[in-house]
Image (cartoon, rainbow, N blue to C red):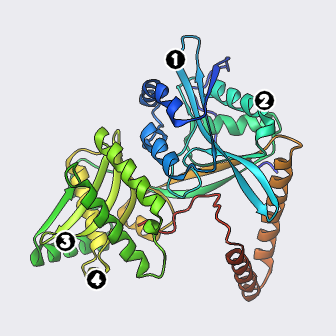
Amino acid sequence: MTVPSTLSPPATATASRELRLRVYDSLESLERLRPAWEKLLAEVPTASVFSTWEWLGAWWRAFGEGQRLQVLALFDDHEQLAGLAPLGITHHTIFRGCRLRLVRLMGDGSADSDNLDIIAQPGSEQAVTDAFLRYLESSSRDWDFCALNTLPSYSPVGQCLLQTLGLQNWPHSTSQRRGFAIDLPKDWETYRKQLSYNERGQLGKYMRRLEREYKVRLHAATESDLSACLQDFFDLHQKRWVSQGQAGSFASQARREFYHDLSRRLLERGWLQLWMLELNGANVGAEYDFLWKDTVYCLQGGFDTNMASGHLGYVLRGYVLKQLIETGIGHYDFLAGRESYKGRWAGRETWYFNIQFARPGSRGALYLRLKHKAAETKEWLRQRLPKNAWKLLQNAKAAGRDRAKSSYSFGGARESRG
């Protein structure tokens, strides 16, 4: 059931060497690792804010209940941190009365994280991969299958892992999700020319109209107004999605607490960019971003739906991009998702991939094999059934999911992200 991958091993990989493993099973014990953790992230060009202590610690405090923390720290002969695999172990329900033990990346499962990864010092990717798999083999009684979701397509350890799983004949499969990013030029006018003629005209028209009718101000939340800006952000996001008949991300109290905790920590590090669009002194639009090195990641947004004719979400993003270009930011990342609006902004496609695997001959391997066969059967039916029959089948399946009220999502798709 192995799905071939087009990814190749990282050019920096060297022959595998033994690394010393230490396992951290609580946030308190991880505190001692923070200086080495930050040093490792600074040395890894593919790292992102989703692999920081700030993100993962806040996430675990909000969503980690009922899971077992297993952070694998791998040290070289000089006691330098060479790799980090932040993991959690939880239960995945197959059907009532049947649960499997699932290993996944810390941060996965709540539909809040992208770019999750196993981090390795350049040149240590294969050694980290081998140590990770040895650990899983040695603790085989604790887990049934592993799902590493939202790995960036360029993940060096992800690439090594796929190759090693194939060489060792571990059952595994991969799937992909699309994302978008913009490589920002040096000035606003150059960027405008990259937009289509229609988009360039529309954006300019809506900006000028707003500036004629209102006193417009774009500002980022500061320590003094962070709580008030977060509340406005929650309200604007919820208002937008509730108006479309959806619950919205911030109907969850746990997610609100996560954002409060996370925002304070990111702001202290200079990484938070919570942009507020203010018209005549009132916040009517919000975009929750964060900065890592030369990239700004766009996570969530919302706007006052009572002013939909002002195209507030569209104009807000234009103002944000203009501000980022003027301050020298190199990239703007929409993260994962196929939303059509992302294609309007002269970006490029990016990709995330998920790896699922299990030990040969295990319960997890049987589950993944059956899951793979079910996916093949679904595709066979989709190609051969009449469209009406396929639609009826899908509607019946959706109704069954609603009755089951399953809460686990493999891909972590954010249905309510703005």
Callout in the foreground (3, 4): 4
Picture disc at residue 80 = 1
- Distance from the alpha carbon under mark 4 to that under mark 1: 55 Å
- Distance from the alpha carbon under mark 2 to that under mark 4: 58 Å
- Distance from the alpha carbon under mark 3 to that under mark 1: 51 Å
Question: Residue at the spot x=79%, y=48% of the render?
Answer: 2
Question: Residue at the spot x=36%, y=76% of the render?
Answer: 239
Earlier in the chain: of badge 4 and badge 1, it is 1
Question: Residue at the spot x=82%, y=68% of the render?
Answer: 377
Residue 339 image offset from top left, x and y in percent: 47, 68
Q: Is residue 202 above or below residue 189?
A: below
Earlier in the chain: of badge 2 and badge 4, it is 2
Q: Is residue 238 above or below residue 296?
A: below
Q: Which residue is mark 4?
A: 306
Q: Is residue 35 above or below residue 362?
A: above
Residue 239 appearing in the image: yes
Circles 3, 1 touching at the beta carbon (< 8 Å): no
Picture disc at residue 138 = 2
